[in-house]
Image (tube, grey):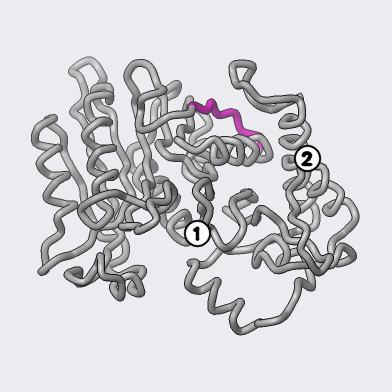
Amino acid sequence: MSIFSPASAFSAADGVRDEALVELLACLKAQHYRFITPTPATHSRVLANRSGQQALNLRDVLGWSLPFEPEVLPSPVLALLQTAQALDSLPDGRFQSRYRVSSLGKDLLLHSAYPTSSADAVFFGPDSYRFVDFVLGEMTRHPPRPGESLVDIGTGAGAGAIAAARAFPELRITMTDINPQALMLAQVNAHAAGLSCDMALGAYLDPIAGMVDRIIANPPYMADDEKRAYRDGGQWHGAQISVEITRRALPRLRPGGQLYLYSGSAIVAGEDRMRAALERLAREHGCTMHYREIDPDVFGEELDRPLYRHVERIAVIGAVLALPKSPNMG
C-alpha cells in the first residue's frame, strides 16, 4: 500500500517503491549509518581526491554517490534499492544509487544523488542544517499552541517540516513543493521518522486553503543560468522567490502568526537589498521583523560567475516576520 493519501494519484508500483524506501531507511538506522552532507563544491573536491576509486562501504554508496560492485552492500540494502528501482546500471557492470541518504538528528533523509544537476533534483546540504537550527531556535522562543498549523513552503526533502514535527508534535504540518519528486521523498522521510504530515503539490501557498499559523521556507536563493527549480531564486541575484514568498505569505497568516524565512542575500556595494525589500513588506502588513545574518559569506565561488560580478558577498539570512496577536489571544 502506498504511504500517500488516497487523494494522490500514485500507482501500485509507486506504493512498492515508497515502502521499499521507508524500509531502506529503517535498515540503515539499524546498521547505525550516518552521513553529513557537505556543499557541492566540497563534495566535488573530495571525489577529486579519490579519483578513480569505487565505493567500499555504505557511506561511499549512499553518501558520496560512488559507483559500486553489488557485493559492497549488505544483501538487504541491495535488495531494497533494487525493489525501489533506485539503482542505475553503468556500462562497466557496476551500479550507482539514484539517491543519497543524510543524517538529520536521529533521522535519515533521502535526497538526490550527487551531482544534483537534473531539473527535478531534491537538494539537501549545509543550508538544510542551518535552516533547521534557525527554525527550531526561533520557534523555541515562541512555542506554538496545541493545534496550530505549519506549512513548509518548498519542503524539498522535508528537513524543516520533519524537524518541526519532532520538536512540536502538537503542530498540524503540511509540506508543499512544485516538484513531485521532492514531495515523494519528503513523505517517505516523514513516514520513516514515524511522523504524520500532509503534502500538497504547488507553488507558494497556492495549494493550501484558509489561514495559517506558522510558515517556514528555505527557498533557492542563487541566480542560476540553467533555471533549475531547486537552485534558481530568480531575479535580483536570486532574491526574487524569497521576496515573493513573503509577499504572498503575510496576508495568509492568522493574528499572531509568524513567517520564518531562511534565505541568501547578495550584498552589493555594502547594501543588503533583501533586508530592504522585507522591511517594506513588513511595514505594509503591520508586521514586526527580526532579521539577522546567520553566515556572512557563503558560496564564494559563485562570485567568479558573470551574474555576480557586482556582488561583494552572499550572506545567509534568517528573518522572522510576525503579525500582532488579536486581543483575545492572551
Q: Nearer the viewer, residue 31 or 71?
A: 71
**Where, quadrant-wise, is the N terminus in this rendering?**
top right
Q: Badge 1 is on which residue?
A: 125
Q: Is residue 107 left or right of residue 207?
A: right
Q: Badge 2 is on which residue?
A: 20
**Residue at the spot 78% in from the left edge and 69% down from the top edge:** 57
- Based on the picture, tell me whether residue 300 belongs to the magenta stretch: no
- Based on the picture, tell me whether residue 199 belongs to the magenta stretch: yes
Q: Is residue 183 left or right of residue 309?
A: right
Residue 135 picture location, percent across and down: 39, 46
Give the amino acid at mark 2: Ala
Give the amino acid at mark 1: Gly
Q: CA distance from mark 2 to mark 1?
A: 24 Å
Category of crowding for the residue at label 1, using alpha-carbon neighbours closer than 10 angstroms: few (below 14), some (14–19), many (at least 20): some
**Residue at the spot 20% in from the left edge and 47% down from the top edge:** 290
- Judge whether 44 appears above or below 324 on screen: below
**Residue at the spot 24% in from the left edge and 57% down from the top edge:** 237
Residue 313 picture location, percent across and down: 24, 70
Q: Nearer the viewer, residue 175 or 304?
A: 304
Category of crowding for the residue at label 2, using alpha-carbon neighbours closer than 10 angstroms: few (below 14), some (14–19), many (at least 20): many
Task: Determine the residue located farthest toward the front in the rendered image.
Answer: 91
